[in-house]
Image (tube, helix red, strand yellow):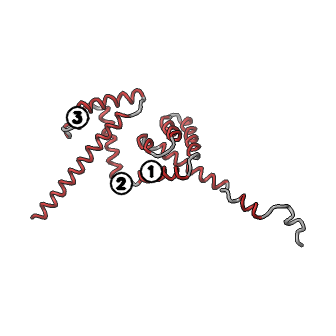
Amino acid sequence: MPNPNRGACGFQSTEFEQEYERPSKSELKRQMTVLQKLGEELVNEARDRVKRVPMPEDVRDAILECQQIKDHEGRRRQLQYVGKKMRTLDEEEVAAIQRTIDSWKGLSKADTANMHAMERRRDKLLTDDKALTVLLSENPELDVQHLRTLIRNARKEQAENKPPKAYREIFQILKEIAKKNNSGKKDADEDDVEQEDDE
């Protein structure tokens, strides 16, 4: 028997359809989780890298602050806050951040290993005076006075919790040395090949 009240409640089927065009609760939760994880990935990256990611200043500040918190509960709460800030970003901003992270992952293992080696060498320069002597013996063209000043300033930055300007500059110098050494090695390899061709 057909229901006499059917269709009498005053709702059109299109009204229901419009309501369901919004994402479901589980879809929203999935999106929130993705943004939370993206925020966590950024928190786990080096500060220098995070500072280069294209994002609003307030989001970056929340991430950088989270990196400094050592207390477990405080860090957990700050991570929640980072997730909340990530949810304020529009799709284009999120896509730009994701592209940046993907490009980092695209670094070859050799590049990553080289970068870690340079970071270790920089840290050794700050803790061990002999490391500077070794670096200068390998690269006599370096400006000794400038390097000593940078090392002194980097130590001061760390002690006073200041922005790592000198610390970064030391890394750039090490990067230049590595680039020069790699191109020199490449040239030597090419010379070897040419000599073999001549024979």
18 sits left or right of 60 in the view: right
- Which element is circle 2 on? loop
Q: Residue at x 31, y 41 (%)?
A: 172
Q: Residue at x 41, y 26 (%)?
A: 160
Q: Residue at x 30, y 32 (%)?
A: 150
164 sits left or right of 25 in the view: left
- Name which of mark 2 and mark 1 comes first in the sequence: 1
- Name which of mark 3 and mark 2 comes first in the sequence: 2
Residue that mark 3 sits on: 143
Q: How many residues crowd mark 2 within 10 Å: few (<14), some (14–19), many (20+)? A: few
Q: Between marks 1 and 3, how big is the CA–CA gap?
A: 34 Å
Inspect the image, locate mark 1, and give the three-letter code of the amino acid beneath it: Thr
Above-or-below relation of 199 to 162:
below
Residue that mark 1 sits on: 100
- Which element is circle 1 on? helix
- Name which of mark 1 and mark 3 comes first in the sequence: 1
The answer to which quarter of the image holds residue 124 is top left
Q: How many residues crowd mark 1 within 10 Å: few (<14), some (14–19), many (20+)? A: some
Are circles 2 and 1 on residues that touch, CB within 8 Å? no
Residue that mark 2 sits on: 108
Q: How many residues crowd mark 3 within 10 Å: few (<14), some (14–19), many (20+)? A: few
* Position in image of residue 57 (x %, y %): 50, 40
* Position in image of residue 109 (x %, y %): 35, 53
* Position in image of residue 127 (x %, y %): 32, 32
Inspect the image, locate mark 2, and give the three-letter code of the amino acid beneath it: Ser
Inspect the image, locate mark 3, and give the three-letter code of the amino acid beneath it: Asp
Image quarter hosting the N terminus: bottom right
